[in-house]
Image (tube, helix red, strand yellow):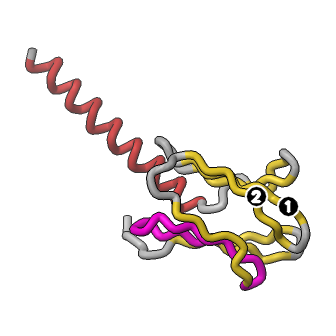
């Protein structure tokens, strides 16, 4: 797994190109629509974020959760538009949790076998 300074992904929504960028070191999330910056937010230490964004006169809601698993979604009037804004970030969080669980299970198994 290679560390990337900026993680980004592009989506097509209603004729608009939406680009999402996340910088893990600064926890800065930016959202661009057709090369216009729509959102810039530092996630810092708050694990739950809900931000309203206007893209071409249409209001969307960006919901970000990063307690245990990363999840970032785009909604329009309670309707899910984009299931995951940064799929590689979600995959990485799932991989790290799986790795941690495997290590814990191995340690527990070794502890049981030694006793």
Q: Quadrant of the N terminus?
A: bottom left
Q: Answer whether labels 1 and 2 touch (C-beta < 8 Å).
A: yes
> Which residue occupies the extreme top position in the image?
115
Quadrant housing the C terminus: top left
**Magenta segment range?**
20-35
Up-down relation of residue 50 to residue 40 (above or below)? above
> Could you tell me which residue is drawn at 48 percent across and 70 percent down?
23
Question: On residue 52, which mark appears?
Answer: 2
CA gap, disc 1 and disc 2: 7 Å
48 or 112, which is in the foreground? 48
| Dominant SS in magenta | strand
Q: Which residue is mark 1?
A: 59
Q: Is residue 83 left or right of residue 76?
A: left
Picture residue at 37% right of the left edge, 69% below the top: 2
Q: Position of residue 45 (x, y in %)?
A: 45, 51
**Residue 10 appears at what percent x and percent y?**
68, 73
On the image, the x and y values in percent for residue 15 come to 88, 75
Instruction: Decide: is 22 above or below 43.
Output: below
Q: Is residue 48 above or below residue 20?
A: above
């Amino acid at each position: 797994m290679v560390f990337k300074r900026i993680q980004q992904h592009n989506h097509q929504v209603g004729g608009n190109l939406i680009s999402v960028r996340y910088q893990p070191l600064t926890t800065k999330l930016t959202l661009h629509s057709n090369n216009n910056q729509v959102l810039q937010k530092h996630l810092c230490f708050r694990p739950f974020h809900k931000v309203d964004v206007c893209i071409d006169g249409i209001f969307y809601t960006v919901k970000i959760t990063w307690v245990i698993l990363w999840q970032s979604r785009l909604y329009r009037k309670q309707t899910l538009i984009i299931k995951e804004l940064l799929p590689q970030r979600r995959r990485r969080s799932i991989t790290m949790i799986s790795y941690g669980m495997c290590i814990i299970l191995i340690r527990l198994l070794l502890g049981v076998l030694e006793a």
